[in-house]
Image (cartoon, coloured by chain):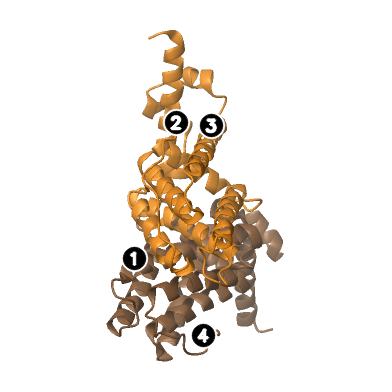
Chain colours: A orange, B brown
Amino acid sequence: MPQQDRAYATREAILHAAAEEFDRLGYERTSLTAVLARAGLTKGAFYFHFPSKEAVADALVERQSDLWARMKESWRLRGLDPLSALHGMFAESADRIATDVVLRAGVRLNADREVGYPGVPSAHVMWEKLVAVHLAEAAERGDLRPGVDPEAVARTLCGAALGSRLISSATTACADFPDRIREVLGHVLPCVASPGWELSGSQTASEVP
Amino acid sequence: MPQQDRAYATREAILHAAAEEFDRLGYERTSLTAVLARAGLTKGAFYFHFPSKEAVADALVERQSDLWARMKESWRLRGLDPLSALHGMFAESADRIATDVVLRAGVRLNADREVGYPGVPSAHVMWEKLVAVHLAEAAERGDLRPGVDPEAVARTLCGAALGSRLISSATTACADFPDRIREVLGHVLPCVASPGWELSGSQTASEVP
């Protein structure tokens, strides 16, 4: 393997091993020693790639943030009605979180920083805004029932997504998160959508590179 | 003040000061020093009442657990239909959490232990079961739409309650939790209840001693 490929593989091995630990234990309780043991690497190899545990966590948070940006864009390009795009994004997020520990760890680290430590919970604010924009567009098209407040529905959906992920994480390592998120969507969307609205488009994962 | 009353007042002052810190910072980041400074007490006074920080946290968790047990009983005694009782319990829980830091800290400590550290999330399992029992009773009475799964609705409501509390806690110290929980109820219950069902009973706080 060329040196550049080996370096890339080592960096990925560190990220994966760290993700396994962060996902199980959270940031505080994850030790570098456990990450190194899991990856089968020395401290020297680690410090060649990352200056600290925090830097690995940052990289995982950044990776999930990049993925969500690409996922949003890919749903936008499909040109679906806003409620269907919203349904698709929530479902795809849950599917990816359930199956990808690197993503799951990044999501946990990001949420823990924000929810655990009061301040500006930027990821939740970002999601609530994104969801509210879709719902406001749906309202403009007449896809919401009269009197439904797009921002209130955004708060409900984002709160339910966060709580469902945490319970699912604690009970099934997120294995039942895809089912839980689809239950949430099934309990809320028909309640706020106009009777004429119908879910459209393929609701399977988009082609995120 | 008689000695017994003084001892009681000191114990309550410790619980209140600890609750303020736990509510803001969580268990790990709360220091005994900060609790004592807040309560204006010495270490000696503290250790007369509690052997450790963990023991204060245990007392707060137990106190919230006792309150929920009494609250459940008081709603049962009202003899409302199960969906109305469920609505009342969720709304009252949120109202109490928003206004009572001792309760709020106990709830946070209990949930952090469980959600933060995978294992048996007993409080969430307990709530999901309680909510599912109410919904199953509602289904038996014909208060749920055909095909609605009581356990799935319980998962949605409990997930939404947890996520809403966390976001509300991080952004407004739970001040907007009562509004958020009522939004959740308003977005879910009409969707799963039979068209004939109507919210009944006074939905204000019950008389929990």
Distance between the Cα atoms at labels 3 and 2? 18 Å
Q: Is residue A37 left or right of residue B87?
A: left
Q: What amino acid type should be assigned to the residue bearing mark 1?
A: Ala
Q: Tag 1: Cα neighbours inside 10 Å, few (<14), some, or many (≥20)?
A: some
- Residue B63 visible in the displayed image: no
- Residue A189: % across, % down: 45, 63
Q: What amino acid type should be assigned to the residue bearing mark 2?
A: Pro
Q: Is residue B143 left or right of residue A144?
A: left
Q: Is residue B65 left or right of residue A129?
A: left
Which residue is label 2 attached to? A209
- Residue B124: % across, % down: 40, 64
- Report if the CB atoms under discs 1 and 3 are less than 8 Å apart: no
Distance between the Cα atoms at labels 3 and 4? 49 Å
Distance between the Cα atoms at labels 1 and 3? 36 Å
Distance between the Cα atoms at labels 4 and 2? 55 Å
SS label for mark 4: loop
Which residue is label 3 attached to? A59
Q: Nearer the viewer, mark 2 or mark 1?
A: 2
Q: Chain of mark 4?
A: B
Q: Earlier in the sequence, mark 4 or mark 1?
A: 1
Q: Earlier in the sequence, mark 3 or mark 2?
A: 3
Q: Tag 2: Cα neighbours inside 10 Å, few (<14), some, or many (≥20)?
A: few
Compared to B50, does A35 lie above or below? above
> Closest to the observer: A35 or A71?
A71
